[in-house]
């Protein structure tokens, strides 16, 4: 197959995969897991606390928070989890930057789920993993700074 045809074929397959994923999730979720926000471990001097947590499904999330006077000034994450977890992690970072620790402590999985436009039933726990990991990170920060 000539290269141009091969490229077209690959693009068509990718389009079909994207369409299937949009049907199963939604456009926003797919966009977030294809282009995660605030992904990656920042430099050590930009981390006040980090925490890794393994969810019931065996996937792990890690959050890195920079906190100044009870305000989350920067939040990054990584995960080895599914696309929905990447979307949930991205969404929570977008919701937490510039917010107080108290705001983060009151966040519920349903808030992430709603902001994402609704995760499929079998992926609701991905939002729970993100929220639990953040809450544990904040608890750790408070213990370290008490
Ligand atoms: Fe494990 Fe999404 S399937 S967190």
Image (cartoon, grey):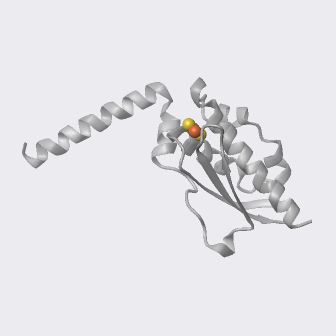
Q: Quadrant of the N terminus?
A: top left
Vertically, is 108 above or below 61?
Answer: above
Residue in view at x 65 percent, y 38 percent: 56
Looking at the image, how many numbered discs can be counted on the residues?
A: 0
Q: Position of residue 116 (x, y in %)?
A: 60, 35
Q: Is residue 75 left or right of residue 34?
A: right
Q: Quadrant of residue 45?
A: bottom right
Q: Position of residue 5 (x, y in %)?
A: 12, 42
Q: Nearer the viewer, residue 36 or 85?
A: 85
Q: Nearer the viewer, residue 28 or 16?
A: 16
Q: Is residue 118 left or right of residue 9?
A: right
Residue in view at x 58 percent, y 44 percent: 59
* Outermost left residue: 2
Q: Position of residue 52 (x, y in %)?
A: 67, 55
Vertically, is 40 above or below 5?
Answer: below
Residue in view at x 72 percent, y 51 percent: 96
Q: Quadrant of the C terminus?
A: bottom right
* Outermost bottom residue: 45
Residue in view at x 23 percent, y 41 percent: 10
Q: Nearer the viewer, residue 126 or 18?
A: 126
Q: Position of residue 41 (x, y in %)?
A: 59, 64
Q: Nearer the viewer, residue 78 or 102?
A: 78
Ligand 1 in which quarter: top right
């Amino acid at each position: 197959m000539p290269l141009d045809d091969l490229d077209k074929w690959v693009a068509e397959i990718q389009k079909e995969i994207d369409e299937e994923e949009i049907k199963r999730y939604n456009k926003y979720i797919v966009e977030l897991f294809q282009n995660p926000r605030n992904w990656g471990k920042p430099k050590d001097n930009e981390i006040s606390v980090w925490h890794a947590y393994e969810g019931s499904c065996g996937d792990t999330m890690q959050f890195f928070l920079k906190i100044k006077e009870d305000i989350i000034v920067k939040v990054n994450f990584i995960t080895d989890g599914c696309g929905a977890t990447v979307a949930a992690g991205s969404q929570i970072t977008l919701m937490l930057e510039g917010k107080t620790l108290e705001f983060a402590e009151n966040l519920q999985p349903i808030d992430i789920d709603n902001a994402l436009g609704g995760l499929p039933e079998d992926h609701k726990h991905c939002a729970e993993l993100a929220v639990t990991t953040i809450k544990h990170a904040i608890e750790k920060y408070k213990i370290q700074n008490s």
